[in-house]
Amino acid sequence: MGQKISMILGGLWLFFFCTGLFSGPAALTWAEQWTALWSNQGVVSTILWDLRLPRLCMASLSGGALAVAGLLMQTYFKNPLAGPSVLGVTSGSTLGVALVSLGGVAVGTGFGLAGTVLGALAGAWSVMVLLGAVIGWFQSRSALLIFGLMVGYLTGALVTVLQAGAEAGALQAFVVWGMGSFAYADWTGVSILAVVLAATGVWSTRHRHDLDMWMLGALTARSMGVNERSLTWAILTITGALAALVTAWCGPVAFLGLATPHLVRILYRQHGAGKLLLPVLLTGSVLALMADWAVRFTAVPLNAVLSMVGAPVVLWLLLRRSESSAP
Amino acid sequence: MNERQDSLGNLAIKALELMHRDLEGMKIDAHLNPGDFMVVVGRNGAGKSTLLHTIMGLLSPLRGQVMLGPDDVFSLSPRERATRMSFVTSTPPRHAGITVRETIELALKAGRGELDTSEAEAHMEATGISVWADRRLDRLSDGMAQRVMVARAAIQSKHIVVLDEPTAFLDVVGKEDVLEQLRQCKENGQIIVLATHDLESVAACGGVTHWLQLRPGISGGSTFHQGGFEPETVRAVLRSEKR
């Protein structure tokens, strides 16, 4: 059952990756593109290697990264509605990027790449550290979500202040960035995200039993040999880094982190975190590629596409929650 | 009993003082051999949970030691500890979507570091939970889930099973099932440490060899009794406490 679904998802991934690679606004023939793919000269080759391939790789990696971050957060907080954008992590990154691009913290003008990345990381990790510090005070699961919402409001207010004082060019660039897009991808971003995602994969695979034990409750997990402190900091660091890197290159991408794990639980009929890691990674990639495909063919911004599909999906999940409440 | 005296599976609580400001000055001493069953009694706030967490190595003591055979519990790594002692909380997990089988398999991995699927199946069969093997924990009733958690604890650790009011939320049948499982553990040579208010059910099920009364605020503060676990006696002792 699971294998069949993975094969279908793998097929979808291949289909959307290839159609993305060999189609676009430039009217190119298959033969032209095929030859250009294997040479590193000429305009066609540049289109494929510098525009389409990094964009597709970034979409795949970002989708997988956000989905895995969502799964880790839902497992750690034992909360089915947790996710990078819900808990304020993406908002933290956005504020970091705004400080750099609008507040002029960066050396030079506009989007200094290193500045953007550092800003996003600093913002995301600040929120994660705050979350780690206050998590013990939250008695109910909804308090955590309200925390995320309030972080969102606060950072939103600060971003508005920065926007009000920003110059037109920087403001426009920031607003466009905020709509989310995989189009600004470059090989640097792809490589960094790939390395972090691979490290996440290694860590999660080694600790997959810890993640499942954690769902039995903190005390029980500790009595089963889980090191609570190292698990907490690993998850906060990893999810913060994944969300921040995606945000730095693609903007505050909505819904993928929250919705993908749920979709995978329904598709695979599995609810343990350990067994869901790979399926979630694959499904996140496929969903991001599909969303990017829709963006390219409809010219609707990424976050609009994701929200139009994501919001009804999450509402539907809430409605059937009485039936499936497990994170 | 004597040849087991210095085996790995003895539990010795030595001049233990708990890390809790309301429990200062209460000294606890107890010594248990494999197959012993100790009930911890005390009024609310007497420190039962704090004591159990300390025995499990999850909470540092103020003074004193918890010895597991020749080892201080606090010198063991969390993994090592998990192979020798296990813990059941009063509330079963309500948000874990893993199945009963996956839970038992996790316990085997925590305890042995490796998984023997046939052992998991046999254990589920023996503890009467195999009918729910493929059901998710969060879809089970509290009573069913708690039975799974006790079965999980029983197979995880070689030596000691510690339980903090495991029957608090269970109906009569659920209680009897859980207590029956504890008797099985005892017969397998595991030490049972059980904190409970449910004196009748525990006494009726039998098998209790020791009981420990916690009385914070009183000089000495705890009494370790061998045998004589009768609900009437225990209740009379608890009633006589000056609060």
Image (spheres, grey):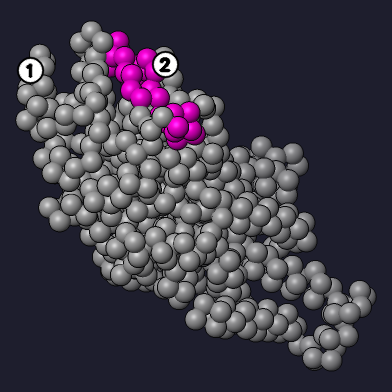
| Disc 2 to disc 1, C-alpha distance | 28 Å
Q: Indicate the quadrant containing the C terminus of chain B: top left, top right, bottom left or bottom right.
A: top left
Q: Look at the image and say whether residue B24 sits in the magenta stretch.
A: yes
User: Mark 1, residues whose alpha carbon is within 10 Å: few (<14), some, or many (≥20)?
Assistant: few
Q: Amino acid at mark 1?
A: Ser
Residue at the location (44% across, 29% down)? B5
Q: Is residue A113 left or right of residue B23?
A: right
Is residue B22 shown left or right of residue B6? left
List the single residue furthest toward the top: B219
Q: Amino acid at mark 2?
A: Gly
**Image point 84% across, 73% down: which residue?**
A46
Q: Is residue A307 visible?
A: no
Q: Which residue is identified by label 1? A: B240
Label 1: chain letter: B
Residue B236 within the magenta-colored segment of the rendering: no
Q: Residue at x 11, y 21 (%)?
A: B237
Residue denoted by label 2: B64
User: Within 10 Å of the Cα at label 2, are there few (<14), some (14-19), or many (20+) other Cα atoms?
Assistant: some
Q: Which of these two is toward me, A187 or A325?
A: A325
Write down the chain letter for disc 2.
B
Residue A68 in picture, x, y percent from top left: 55, 59
Respond whether the residues carrying marks 2 and 1 are from the same subunit.
yes
Kindly state the secondary structure of the residue where label 2 is placed. strand
Q: Secondary structure at mark 1?
A: loop
For residue B7, above or below residue A304 = above
Sequence order check, earlier mark of 2 and 1: 2
Q: Quadrant of residue A123?
A: top right
Q: Nearer the viewer, residue B58 or B190?
A: B190
Residue A195: horizontal and vertical position, in percent?
72, 55
Is the N terminus of chain B in the top left, top right, bottom left or bottom right quadrant?
top left
Residue B132 visible in rendering: yes
Q: Which residues are magenta?
A: B3-31
